[in-house]
Image (cartoon, grey):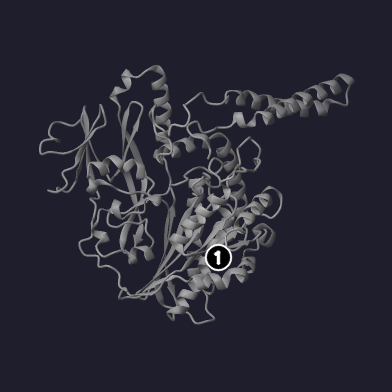
Amino acid sequence: MEIAPSSSRFKLNDQFKLLEFRDKYVVTPVVDSPHERGFSVNRRDGNIKPLDEDASSGNPTKVSTIYGVGGTIRLLAGTYLLVITSREKAGSFLGFPIFRVTAMKFLPCNEALRFATAQEKKDETYFRTLLQALEATPGLYFSYETDITLNLQRRCKLAEGWNRKPIWKQADPRFVWNWRLLEELIECKLDGFILPLLQGSYQVAELKLKNSPAVISLISRRCTRRLGTRMWRRGANLEGDTANFVETEQIVEINGFKFSVLQVRGSIPLLWEQIVDLSYKPQLKINKHEETPKVVQHHFHDLCQRYGDVIAVDLTDQHGAEGELSKAYATEMEKLQTVRYVSFDFHQVCGTTNFDNLGVLYEQIGDAFEKQGYFLVDADENILEEQKGVIRSNCIDCLDRTNVTQSYMAQKILNLQLQRIGVFDSTDCVSLFEDDYTKFRTIWAEQGDEISLQYAGTYALKGDLVRYGKQTMAGAIKDGISAMSRYYLNNFQDGVRQDALDLISGRYTVGTNSPSQLQPIGAQPSKQFLPVASALLIGGVTVTSFSIHQAGRNTQQYLATALWAGVTAGVVAMIKANGRHLCSRPRLCHLI
């Protein structure tokens, strides 16, 4: 079987002029094209129109260069146009340049705001806060010349001529971050301006294995079906879509051959939650629901349809709250005869330093993993091997333990691939080549950091195990800082970030009659009490400590110590009792 030829491939313009007039925005290609004049967006009502010959005439108030249009979104008082204002080249995907978004901006088309009610203006202000959060979205990638949402095996098996379609038609909607924003541009048939954005990670390394130059690309694709933050999107929804679902593809190009292997990660596909309440580890709750078996079935049916045989590797602890969740997962998996479920207590077997103990897991699943295989094409683009299945890994967050495990599996399959074409003999492995092994581990560690930033807001923990195979002092300090940052973000920032993601993914649609509007925007929970409570707590601890030093002097000091200790304990109890109300919570949608 041969790959479809690449002649007449559809290509987008890579630079545009943004002309700002008092009544409209105009977007035109920098390089004149008779087929793509551009389009205008009315600043009063947000209506989009393809340009006629004189539509861009006149004197604009501002002219600037942009590098793509991300789409439009309609809020209460009008439309906002998303444009990419800065980019950087991240590398090449199968020979095509890939860029990373470094800055983007929502341009308002909302002059009708001055006619809005006071409440509408207040709500619009909150929505604009969400747009500002979205402008800082990390890990967005795109290409003007090819679709990057499809893995190599899917690309090669598509019908001839697929790459001549507009890039948005080639893309897998699951992995297009701005899919909802592109709807109006699609309706207006502005194919030359429709730029799908992938959220995830793209890393590349150049190796020289036994004098054979090789390029390893690592591309991760984040699914948008259950988009969210670490604590506000856990588990699955009723359709079987899971939080933090990511498809990761490792592509190796060497001696004219191209290898590809896929792994996926995703939250445990049950209905469960872990609502922040100011505690370091909030209580984990499994929601008993009659639809749970169907949720699990839907999830794995979809995976099997897309990837073939599935090995579900559960890396959670087998005790405590994690153990209860893992037990519930195992119970549901016993009902599925088509999926192999493997429970592996990562912390028990590997601890914090024994990365090589993942060999215990490999002994359990190695034969099945190798039987799933990988995708391989030769220099003449003939398909020699196909991947017949996938490992689906999870821990609680599907970040730290998952990334360590996936990198281990990727290393194992890389050795087999290089042995397949004779670069390695049966005794060789990539870990014997220090410089190349360092590059390999680095791209996996950086990929883990990017995925973690998107879900948890911090760098990944256990990154040292991926980079160096062991924990270092610097890594332990970095993990401690990341853990504290996660605590702060989860409790005091992620409610707003979750609302922003619900808005961008279309889970919440602005409009009083919209069925997606699950609940009105209300007042934020009583966060104003948190500074007072914090001040009382810090003051109580300080005064209590001082009183203890003075307590031996007289009975009055004993009473003062007891009084302040009581006040401090009372404040602690009040904060604990009201923890959920003091945290940043989403205001737009229900959790499930």
Viewer-proximal residue, 258 or 180?
A: 180
| Mark 1 neighbour density, 10 Å: few (under 14) some (14–19) many (20 or more) | many
Q: Residue at x 34, y 66 (%)?
A: 157
Viewer-proximal residue, 477 or 187?
A: 187
478 lies left or right of 67: right
Q: Residue furthest left?
A: 53
Q: Is residue 354 above or below residue 279?
A: below
Q: Position of residue 579 (x, y in %)?
A: 64, 31
Viewer-proximal residue, 299 or 449?
A: 299
Q: Decide if residue 324 is in sight here.
A: yes
Q: Position of residue 390 (x, y in %)?
A: 49, 64
Q: Is residue 367 above or below residue 354?
A: below
Q: Residue at x 36, y 76 (%)?
A: 255
The amino acid marked with disc number 1 is Tyr
Q: Residue at x 67, y 57 (%)?
A: 347
Where is mark 1, residue-wise?
408
Q: Decide if residue 62 is in sight here.
A: no
Q: Is residue 396 above or below residue 497?
A: below
Q: Is residue 384 above or below residue 410?
A: below
Q: Quadrant of the N terminus?
A: bottom left
Helix, strand or loop for disc 1: helix
Q: Residue at x 88, y 23 (%)?
A: 553
Residue 568 sits in which quadrant? top right
Viewer-proximal residue, 591 or 526?
A: 591
Q: Position of residue 16 (x, y in %)?
A: 23, 44
98 lies left or right of 418: left
Residue 189 sits in which quadrant? top left
